[in-house]
Image (spheres, rainbow, N blue to C red):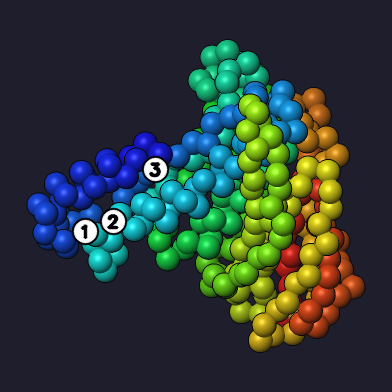
Amino acid sequence: PSGNCLEWTHRFFEKLTQGQPENFRVPIWGFAPHYYCGSAGTALDFSDAQWYQLLKQAAYMDTLIQEQWEAMAEYDPQHRVKLVVDEWGCWHPSGTEINPYHLFEQMSTLRDALAAALTLDIFNNHCDKVAMANVAQLVNCIHSLFLADGEHFVRTPNYYVFDMYKDHQGAKCLKTKLEADDISYTIDGEKRTIPGLWGSASLQENKLTLTLVNLQLKDPLETKINIVGATVKQIVQTVLTHQDSHAHNTFETPDVLIPKSKKLDLTGEKFTIELEPASVSKFTLTL
């Protein structure tokens, strides 16, 4: 379906099962909703309120997955069919393409990187439901990881998020409980809120990967982390952020927005760290 169209989902599975749950006319293993979170403002021109609005639109992926999963359960109680979110990402108005012949090409800023990160966290936390997920297009298009033209090539902020999150692949998802204040903002005269902290965690042998996204545009977030059932021996933190929320990489300045890593002098089961404003953080914990 396009977005979270539950009516389309019900019609599809009703036809597929002929009204009898699990009586599939043809075998399928995946069902693919497409969800682009659109834009708020433009790719490079947006207000503080539009910063939060786009991230709220991206976070709707969590609702989409849960509601689609519940609708599918009416026809597939054992959940043999999984979700395949094979198109997602920010889709901005035209105007920032590097070549007019590149269809739907757009610049990606720090805001797009946070949208990508919280979406990947959502996928991680619903890994029992989402069997596969694909960013829309890889190069020169919607929410791309790379931009290229002739001999020129640059990695977008989205690429660095994917690079940071790759340690989750092939690992075992861990249950995370996040508690943080909601962020309030006003757009088009309407007051809205969004959770200020997103994240996910996974374990592979003795390496625990924790990714956290602080949506607060201007304020750091002091975060207390409690690891249950294990002791941390070493922590390496990798952070993607910038003082300018509109920061992006170009052919001329390819390293404006790149992640930086440092070792933290913290061990044990409980510790406190500070998340920088408008940041994606990965913590690699050796247990």
Residue 28, image x, y percentages: 23, 54
Residue on which disc 1 sits: 75
Q: Are marks 1 and 2 in contact (CB under 8 Å)?
A: yes
Residue 174, image x, y percentages: 57, 73
In the image: residue 144, left or right of residue 217: left
Identify which residue, 21 or 266, lies in the foreground: 21
In the figure, residue 156 lies in which quadrant?
top right
Amino acid at the residue labelled 1: Tyr
Label 1 vs label 3: CA separation?
Answer: 17 Å
Q: Which mark is residue 72?
A: 2
In the image: residue 100, left or right of residue 164: left
Label 1 vs label 2: CA separation?
Answer: 6 Å
Residue on which disc 3 sits: 4
Residue 287, image x, y percentages: 72, 81
Q: Is residue 195 above or below residue 206?
A: above
Identify which residue, 54 or 100, lies in the foreground: 54
Q: Which mark is residue 132?
A: none
Disc 1 residue crowd, few under 14, some 14–19, many 20+, Cα 10 Å: many
In the figure, residue 197 lies in which quadrant?
bottom right
Q: Residue at x 16, y 49 (%)?
A: 14
Element under disc 3: loop
